[in-house]
Image (cartoon, rainbow, N blue to C red):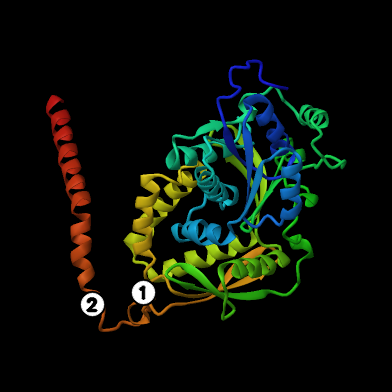
Amino acid sequence: MELSSQSRLGTVKRAVLAYSGGLDTSIIIPWLRENYGCEVIAMVGDVGQGDDFRMVRQKALRTGAKRVFVEDLREEFITGYIWKAIQAGAIYEGKYLLGTSLARPVLAKRQVEVALACGADAVAHGCTGKGNDQVRFELTYKALAPQLRVIAPWREWSIKSREDALEYARKHNVPVPVTRRALYSRDQNIWHLSHEGGPLETQLGEPPEDAWKLTRSPRQAPDRETAVEIGFESGIPVSVNGRRLKPLALLEKLNEIAGANGVGRTDLVENRFVGIKSHGAYETPAGTLLHAAHHELEALCLDRETFHYKQHVGLRYAELVYFGQWFTPLREALDGFIQVTQRRVTGTVTLGLYKGGIRVLDRRSPYSLYDTSIAGFTMGADYDQRDAEGFINILGLPLKMEALKGQKAEVGKRKAVDGKR
């Protein structure tokens, strides 16, 4: 399972590994020590996955880590990444709310910070060579600390399967729980829970019910509609049902409400960065509510041209996030545009949740551009219908000229034909 060449030994003195405590990253610790002869520091990032971090720390130390950093990144993850994605309206391919994509740059950023603070000369991750995450981690490394060497074991070692990994763990005394292999590969944080593998790889129909964990089946959801009011200030969620909440508590509350009503499930065939199509199931209960409510509030508060143009920006923003290009000048520049658009996106939206569905019950804002004096059928003094003739004439001038030229050309053609007769 080791590198065939020994020339790498001694080339790295200290490496910081993005560590989760799972099988892959657990065997990477002894593998790095064996093949690079380096000291290994484990960096564990808490983005709301709900792990027992005391146990994760102990496991890292038992398998050879010199030091372990457990970093609580939940608040930073929400306010510095999730909130920005909501303000941007960033949804990848119209369905994916970017749960994993948004978490990777915050984890990689803290990993780099730990590496620089500890005097490390390398960073390592457990991402495979087929997925998106390798791109997200490594582009962050290059943007924030290009001098650090990047070690990606899955692109170097001879391990090809879970069975190979288990055998390596056994030989190197890496503790692995003796449990039945999980049917699905899952990634969880405060924003979402993703499910891949298992029957999802071979079936493109509705995911099996046992795939879902955060949301109740819509068929088993309450028979009565649940109303939830979400308050925003400058495009940022601040309250639920009139009660101001801190970011983490707000997401937890909305996850609970939406999940109980079967809201937040997405079945998606997506285009990975490397060009492979994959089939996954995603649960984003709170995120589904927040995106829906934010969109309604923007429709109320933004003028037409800004609202339409921002939809294009949201698509590009989602691509940047998905492709791992968070720490780029373009993303930062788009943030500047988005922040201006959000200055008056303040107010409340009330949603009705019923068996997996969402409908809008109410929307209110002190900056609402909806005005009944001009929107209604009753003719008021603020809108003179006679003005419409002028802008229609101007708007239609190119169409009129094209039609007249066409008619003139047709007349010329007919005369030419008649002249030959």
Q: Measured along the vertical axis of the image, is residue 128 above or below residue 44?
A: above
**Residue 34 on image: x %, y %:** 69, 26
Whether residue 316 is visible to the viewer of this picture, yes or no, is: yes
On residue 369, which mark appears? 1
Q: Nearer the viewer, residue 122 or 74?
A: 122
Q: Does residue 132 appear anywhere in the picture? A: no
Q: Quadrant of residue 352?
A: bottom right
Is 248 rendered above or below residue 239?
above
The relative height of residue 13 versus residue 286 in the rendered view (above or below) is above
Q: Which of the two residues, 308 or 131, is positioned nearer the viewer here?
A: 131
Q: Looking at the image, is mark 2 or mark 1 earlier in the sequence? A: 1
What residue is rendered at 32% in x and 60% in y?
305
The answer to whether the residues at label 2 and label 1 have Cβ atoms under 8 Å apart is no
Between the residue at mark 2 and the residue at mark 1, the CA separation in whole angstroms equals 19 Å
Q: Residues within 10 Å of mark 2 (few under 14, many from 20)?
A: few
Residue drawn at the location 59% of the way across and 59% of the way down: 74
For badge 2, the amino acid type reads Asp
Secondary structure state at the residue bearing disc 2: loop
Residue 312 appears at what percent x and percent y? 40, 51
Q: Where, quadrant-wise, is the N terminus in this rendering?
A: top right
Determine which of the numbered discs, if any, sits on residue 230 in the image: none
Q: Is residue 165 above or below residue 193?
A: above
Residue at disc 1, secondary structure: loop
Q: In the figure, residue 204 lies in which quadrant?
A: top right
Count how many numbered circles sit on residues in the image.
2
- Badge 2 is on which residue? 384
Location of residue 154 (image quadrant): top right
Q: Residues within 10 Å of mark 1 (few under 14, many from 20)?
A: few
Which quarter of the image is occupied by the C terminus?
top left
- Residue 120 is left or right of residue 400, and the answer is right
Most foreground residue, 325 or 75 = 75
